[in-house]
Amino acid sequence: QVQLVESGGGLVQAGGSLRLSCAASGRTFSNYVMGWFRQAPGKEREFVVAITWNHGYTYYADSVKGRFTISKHNAQNTVYLQMNSLKPEDTAVYYCAARSFNPGIDGLRRGHEYDYWGQGTPVTVSS
């Protein structure tokens, strides 16, 4: 049974930092793409960033480029999202997701094409 378990969310002041983790289990993810999405209250879910498990290629949404960094630890089957210079508009529930095919950046933005999802971890950035 595949499981994606996020952790690391919390309350932080604007300008601060948080690191989210996504622990993956239940299968081999070597050919998968791992993504982070977020959903703010009253808004649609949006793509944040993705990384290919085998080569480490990364794809960022424009809104987080230069502030967020995705990384992975192969041995621990864990993906990280380092979030710096946080803004109130980054407030959302952050979800980890996995998909088995990399269609390029346009496809990676489509959340409904991901195969597995975590339960989400909330991030609140106060002004």
Image (cartoon, rainbow, N blue to C red):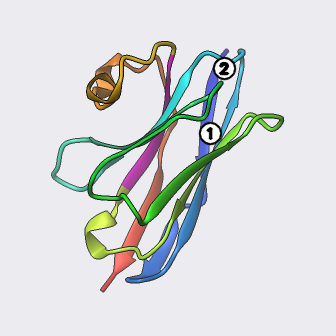
Q: Which range is magenta?
A: 93-99
Few, some or many C-alpha atoms within 10 Å of disc 2 (few <14, some 14-19, many ≥20)?
some
Q: Residue at x 40, y 64 (%)?
A: 66
Q: Position of residue 53 (x, y in %)?
A: 62, 28
Kindly identify the residue that appears in the image at 44 percent across and 58 percent down. Answer: 122
Secondary structure beneath dot 1 equals strand
Crowdedness of circle 1 by 10 Å Cα count: few (<14), some, many (20+)?
some
Quadrant for residue 31, please give it.
Answer: top right
In the displayed structure, 15 sits above or below 73; it is below
Location of residue 124 (image quadrant) = bottom left
Location of the N terminus by quadrant is top right
Q: Position of residue 54 (x, y in %)?
A: 65, 24
Residue at screen point 47% across, 79% down: 12
Asked whether residue 111 is drawn in magenta, I would say no
The residue located at (53%, 34%) in the rendering is 57
Quadrant of residue 28 in the image?
top right
Q: Is residue 109 above or below residue 91?
A: above
* Quadrant of the frame with the C terminus: bottom left
Please give the residue where the numbered disc 2 appears in the rendered image: 29
- Name the amino acid, label 1: Val
Q: Earlier in the sequence, mark 1 or mark 2?
A: 1
Disc on res. 21: none
Question: How far separated are the C-alphas under marks 1 and 2?
Answer: 14 Å
- Label 1 belongs to which residue? 5
Give the x, y percent position of residue 126: 35, 82
Taken as a whole, is the magenta stretch helix, strand or loop?
strand
In the displayed structure, 56 sits above or below 48; it is above
